[in-house]
Amino acid sequence: MPKKPTSGKSGRVVRLPTVRPPETPVQNLLWRIDRLERQVHTLSELVREHAEDTDRLVRIVGEDREILRRELLRQHHAKVRLRKHTREHEAGVELTST
């Protein structure tokens, strides 16, 4: 089975060494253990990179939500000021018409 390339952090392809398993059962077992350790190491790196990417995305989404919250609050305050100004203006018109 050919080795599948994995992608490193810099985006370059890192290929696992293509070493044939030794012929004796003990050597074969040691080769398999070594290969599994390399695979676990590669998987650990990928999991860590994924966690870092997730943390970055959470931070970006949090910042975007804060910006949206501030904008909605600003719009709400603008509407409240407009209603207050309209009420004051209407109250002033009623007082001068009577």
Image (cartoon, rainbow, N blue to C red):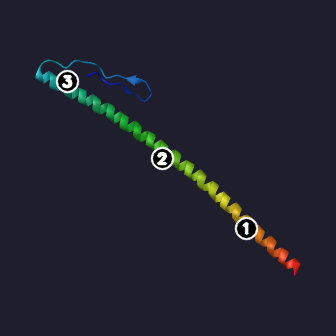
Residue at left 16%, top 23%?
28
Q: Which residue is denoted by mark 1 in the rendering?
A: 83
The answer to whether 47 appears left or right of 82 in the picture is left
Q: Is residue 82 above or below residue 91?
A: above
The numbered mark at residue 61 is: none
Neighbours of disc 2 within 10 Å: few (<14), some (14-19), many (20+): few
Tell whether label 3 touches label 2 (CB within 8 Å): no
Secondary structure beneath label 1: helix
Cα separation between marks 2 and 3: 40 Å
Q: Earlier in the sequence, mark 2 or mark 3?
A: 3
Q: Earlier in the sequence, mark 1 or mark 3?
A: 3
Q: Amino acid at mark 2?
A: Val
Q: In the rendered image, which quarter is residue 49 located in?
A: top left
Residue 67: percent from left, percent from top:
60, 51
In the displayed orientation, state which residue is furthest to the left: 25
Q: Amino acid at mark 1?
A: Arg
Q: Amino acid at mark 3?
A: Trp
